[in-house]
Amino acid sequence: MDELMTDATRILNAIAQGKPSAAHELLPLVYDELRRLAARKLANEPAGQTLQPTALVHEAWLRLVGNEPAEFSSRGHFFGAAAEAMRRILIERARQKKAIKRGGGVTRLNLDEVDVAATTDDATLLLVDEALEKLADEDAEAAQFVKLRFFAGFTNQEAALALGVPERTARRHWTYARAWLYREIQRLSVA
């Protein structure tokens, strides 16, 4: 992953310096890493999973770059934007399913047992998203960390590297965010 980060940083710097042709180098490099992360997280899921890693990565990439490559200031900025794109895709998908079903039961959420949003039921995903929006208002950095962990499937180490923070800070963000989100989700579930 270190070599990937070095290459990604080099390409992002070239794009920031006004070399748009460098964006074409970014796609295969970042696509492979995002696809690997998604596949790793979904590998232990039962057969019949409706959202495949490839589809999620493709949709996220299209949202990130559209017809023109976006400008990212760092690898952390890029992976944060990718996590946000994946989060939005998963939330939209969950909302569409919920609208079709017209309801559904709310389930308890244990964030220690949830690896990635693509494997989480829709009702829980919507609760996490609503709580995450509120967390972002109080602690944007912790919310960004949750997006990388929960929506992009990063490990603590990978999220720390992407955000440019020490692993100890990453563990502190994760501990705080889990407790905050649990409390908020409990409150939303009762409401």
Image: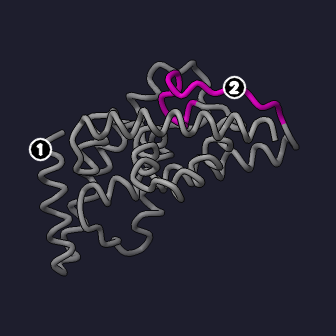
Lower position in the chain sequence, tag 1 or tag 2: 1
Q: In percent of the image, x 48 and y 63: which residue is there?
A: 63
Categorize mark 2 by other alpha carbons within 10 Å: few (<14), some (14-19), many (20+). Answer: few
Query: Which of the image's four quarters has the N terminus?
Result: top left
Question: Which residue has dot 2 on it?
Answer: 108
* Front in this rendered view, residue 13 or 49: 13
Residue at point 42%, 51% (across, down): 144
User: How many labels were placed on the picture?
Assistant: 2
Q: Is residue 149 above or below residue 96?
A: above
- Residue 30 in percent (x, y) is at 28, 51
The residue at 62%/25% (across/down) is 48
**Residue that carries the numbered disc 1 in the rendered image:** 3
Q: Is residue 28 within the magenta segment?
A: no
Q: Amino acid at mark 2?
A: Arg
| Callout 1–callout 2 Cβ contact below 8 Å | no
Q: Nearer the viewer, residue 171 or 157?
A: 171
Q: Which stretch appears magenta? A: 104-119
Secondary structure mostly taken by the magenta-highlighted segment of the chain? loop
Element type where label 1 sits in the image: helix
Question: Which numbered dot is residue 156?
Answer: none
Residue at 65% x, 49% y: name it: 130
